Image: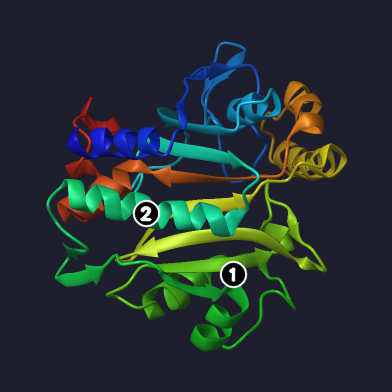
Amino acid sequence: MLICEAIRAYFRKERFLEVETPLRVPVVAPEQYIVPFASESWFLSTSPELQMKRLLAAGYEKLFQMCHCFRKEERGRLHNPEFTMLEWYRAGADYTQIISDTEQLLLFVAEALGLGTTIHYQGKDIDLTPPWQRITVRDAFLRASGWDPIAAHDPERFDIDMVDKVMPALAPDRPTVIMDYPAACASLSRLKPGNPLVAERAEVFIGGLEIANAYSELNDAAEQERRFSAEIEKIRKEGKTALMPERFLEAIRHLPLCGGIALGVDRLVMLFCDTASIDDVIAFPSDML
């Protein structure tokens, strides 16, 4: 609980508004590799993102939330079907500013725990002092696996090489931010001005753990509808259900330029408690109920 208290203290210090959004919703963001749990004709929330962005569109400029999220077919050393997510959004920000928030948040939590700027995780000392190392997807893949996924996107090879080659090559004693993902991996992020092959998306890796996923948020309703339509087609081809988030699309017509991030709280606790399994930081993992 001390970690969660420190997280809240940081955002209150930064004058963010803590919000609560529904855990049971009529529609979730259609994403091919995220499978929601059905709840009668609705769904358990896979992320509070759609609702939090609707609040941004309504005029709230700095929001954060810690909540439970639910995703089917996710169970393993780093995954539980029910988990805790921290998300925050800033009007007028982009992904670089959100990453700066992340640096300051983790340093704040470490100091609240009496750890200073260095934590010990799985036999390694990790220095959290900002700024963290930043590397583009292109450079990370060229160095670790010898190909450029921006010039020639191959989704299957991308996922395999990220886990088997890129992540193991990251510095073990410092957090690393991998930035500028292929446009095909843009999800709800906007494309980089002047370079439509790249999305303003970044992921934070610490001690071999993927901790957070940051975006410069897309606020073009027509482009977002096009992306959702493509995802819905893929999902339905697999015989699964997917719906268009109509109210979200209406709201983002009023969404300001903004940045946001989703951070896995359970993995953050793993990091600060020096444990390799999510089961060690959840009182009731799904197969222990």
The relative height of residue 265 versus residue 125 in the rendered view (above or below) is above
Residue at point 42% right, 42% down? 74
Residue at the image position 23 percent from the left and 40 percent from the top: 3
Per the model, the C-alpha gap separating discs 2 and 1 is: 30 Å
Residue 165 percent location from the top left of the image: 45, 78
Q: Are marks 2 and 1 in contact (CB under 8 Å)?
A: no
- Examine the image and state in which quarter residue 219 appears: top right
Residue in front for this viewpoint, 16 or 115: 16
Label 2: which residue?
104
Q: Hey, what amino acid is under mark 1?
A: Phe
Instruction: Tell which of 146 and 194 is nearer to you.
Output: 194
Residue 280 lies in what quarter of the image? top left
Q: How crowded is mark 1: few (under 14 residues within 10 Å), some or many (20 or more)?
A: some
Residue 134 place in picture, x, y as percent: 49, 73
Q: Mark 1 points at which residue?
A: 158
- Residue 74 vertical placement versus 156 (above, below): above
Where's residue 20, x and y in %?
Answer: 47, 20
